[in-house]
Image (cartoon, rainbow, N blue to C red):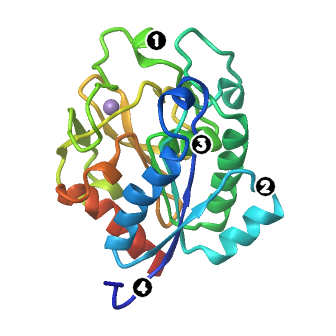
Amino acid sequence: MPAKKCKALIGITCSRLVGAAWSKLSKGHFINYTLEAYGRAVAACAAAPVLVPLGQFGAGLELILERLDGLILSGGPDVHPRHYRGMPLAGLGDVDDELDRMELELAGLALARDIPILGICRGHQILNVACGGSLFQDIAGQVPGALLHNPGIDKGTTSHTIKIEKGSLLYRIIGKDEIWVNGRHHQAVEKVAPGLKVSAVAPDGIVEALEDPSRRFAIGVQWHPEGTWKNDPYSLRLFEALVEACGA
Ligand SMILES: [Mn+2]
């Protein structure tokens, strides 16, 4: 049943499999996952999802953004440290140079246009790097005593709590200062970009959410609401808030 009223057109970036993952999973995995998880979450909020594929730069991205009301930077492979003036360390996982360049340009253009952005996992990290921040390439190797942020469980299962900063946009959306989330990441925000604010942290201090208070709606979350929105009202609220911001 199509939604009675469609409130916004939301672009969703889309990874491809690279490196080791390429041989382990079916080649259409990321595109199918992006549509099934992120796409259906957007549609559940009475908005229309479209995929933004790899390989778009410059004028192509500008035209895509002219048509979009909102943008989701989706999960995917690691970000290469070259984009925050770092060198690869042991523990860096698979990277995709074309995806890095495309998503960083897209994030910058969307911020400049003040298009509502929700960054998820890799997308949260892209938001930080696009604004001038840096990342831990591998939490286990760089943050002694950190929780296991990459448990071997599916994305429908929550695994650790986060503390949400009162007064943040995220707090206004979620309405609680502590929730369980389904993290599946081994990289994390190290240096927070100038202009961004930390809006949630894990019990070990790892940055779990960021936002840009100078924009209408620019939020990054380190967890995967697209994996839990069917059962978890806080996950669904994030997508609803993005769609609401598009109409504001
Ligand atoms: Mn985490």
**How many angstroms separate mark 4 from mark 3 (CA)?**
29 Å
Q: Residue at x 38, y 72 (%)?
A: 43
Give the labeled residue for mark 4. 6
At mark 3, the secondary structure is loop
Checking the image for residue 57, the label placed there is 2
Mark 1–mark 3 CB contact (< 8 Å) = no
Give the labeled residue for mark 1. 142
140 with respect to 181 (left or right): right
Checking the image for residue 105, the label placed there is none
User: Which one is in front, 214 or 76?
Assistant: 76
231 with respect to 221 (left or right): left
Viewer-side label of 2, 1: 2
Mark 1 vs mark 3: which is more N-terminal?
3
Mark 2 vs mark 3: which is more N-terminal?
3
**How many angstroms separate mark 2 from mark 1 (CA)?**
33 Å
User: Badge 4: how crowded within 10 Å, few (<14), some, or many (20+)?
Assistant: few
The type of residue carrying mark 4 is: Cys
User: Is 231 located above or below residue 24 in the figure?
Assistant: below
Q: Residue at x 48, y 45 (%)?
A: 29
At mark 1, the secondary structure is helix
Residue furthest to the bottom in view is 4
The type of residue carrying mark 1 is: Gln
Mark 4 vs mark 3: which is more N-terminal?
4
125 with respect to 19 (left or right): left
**How many angstroms separate mark 4 from mark 1 (CA)?**
45 Å
At mark 2, the secondary structure is loop
Mark 4–mark 3 CB contact (< 8 Å) = no
Q: Give ligand 1's quarter of the image.
A: top left
The type of residue carrying mark 2 is: Phe
At mark 4, the secondary structure is loop
Viewer-side label of 2, 3: 3
Mark 4 vs mark 2: which is more N-terminal?
4
